[in-house]
Image (spheres, rainbow, N blue to C red):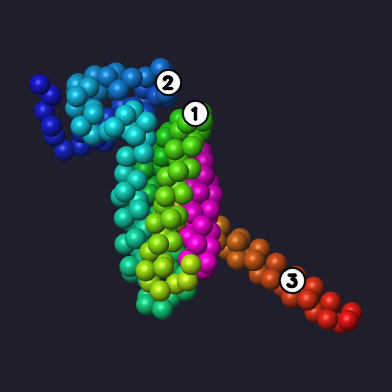
């Protein structure tokens, strides 16, 4: 009988990634994943509801990292400032450099399968809703809470895609900072253009 031991879930995850990459996601069974590391199918299902969830194990931990980061933001901080602090904390804790090859392999598998892509979108949507709820709990209004949360998830998704590119050396936290910089430049330019348009209309009246 296979022995229950620490790290079993991680062993199954790594085995699944290797099998999905070599055989294909659809062609790989939960039994084959378990057997490849000397475990039973029963042990596999103690850890994961199905083979799809191997790729999404740890979602709760990622949400927890975001929420812990939000708790560390100063009282009275603006909605987006809180999100930025949370994202920096999560990126530093949850996505160290040594995790990059694993994340790259995982994303490659997800990108090849429509059902997995939908599951990934659902994961990010759930994360965004969780962040928005936590912002509301801090006394931030509904609209700014949702805007800040959704903006953060967009930046996270774009930064993550850059972070897993071959040859990329920057940390996820640094890439997030760069992407936020681009966002702030765009919004500042748009705000300036909008103000100019309003002023021009007033002059023409």
In percent of width and height, residue 71 lies at 33, 67
Look at the numbered discs 1 and 2 and tell me whether their residues touch, using CB distance below 8 Å: yes
Are the residues tagged 1 and 3 within 8 Å (C-beta)?
Answer: no
Q: Based on the picture, tell me whether residue 146 belongs to the magenta stretch.
A: yes
Q: In the image, what residue occupies the spot 52% across and 67% down?
A: 143
Horizontally, residue 200 falls left or right of residue 108, namely right
How many angstroms separate mark 2 from mark 3 (CA)? 50 Å
- Label 3: how many Cα within 10 Å (few below 14, some 14–19, many 20+): few
Q: In front: 146, or 152?
A: 146
Q: Mark 2 vs mark 3: which is more N-terminal? A: 2
Residue 10 image offset from top left, x and y in percent = 26, 36
Report helix, strand or loop for mark 1: loop
| Residue 75 highlighted magenta (yes or no) | no
What residue would you read off at disc 3? Answer: 194
Q: Quadrant of the C terminus?
A: bottom right
Q: Position of residue 197 (x, y in %)?
A: 80, 73
Q: Circle 2 — which element?
A: loop
Residue 36 vs residue 25, the one in the foreground: 25
* Span shown in magenta: 143-170
Closer to us: 1 or 179: 1
What residue do we see at 34% from left, 46% from top? 59
Q: Which residue is mark 2?
A: 26
| Separation of marks 1 and 2 at Cα, in angstroms | 9 Å
Disc 1 or 3, which lies upstream in sequence? 1
């Amino acid at each position: 009988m296979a022995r229950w031991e620490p790290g079993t879930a991680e062993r199954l995850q790594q085995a699944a990634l290797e099998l999905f990459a070599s055989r294909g996601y659809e062609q790989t069974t939960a039994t084959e994943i378990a057997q490849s590391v000397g475990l039973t199918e029963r042990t596999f299902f103690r850890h994961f509801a199905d083979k799809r969830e191997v790729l999404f194990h740890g979602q709760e931990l990622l949400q927890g990292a975001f929420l812990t980061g939000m708790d560390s933001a100063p009282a009275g901080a603006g909605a987006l400032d809180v999100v930025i602090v949370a994202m920096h904390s999560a990126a530093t804790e949850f996505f160290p450099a040594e995790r990059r090859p694993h994340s790259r392999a995982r994303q490659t598998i997800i990108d090849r399968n429509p059902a997995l892509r939908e599951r990934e979108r659902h994961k990010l949507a759930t994360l965004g809703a969780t962040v928005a709820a936590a912002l509301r709990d801090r006394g931030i209004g509904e609209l700014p809470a949702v805007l800040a949360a959704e903006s953060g998830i967009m930046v996270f998704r774009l930064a993550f895609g850059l972070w897993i590119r071959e040859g990329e050396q920057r940390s996820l936290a640094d890439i997030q900072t760069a992407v936020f910089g681009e966002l702030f430049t765009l919004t500042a330019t748009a705000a300036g253009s909008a103000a100019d348009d309003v002023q021009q209309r007033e002059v023409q009246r």
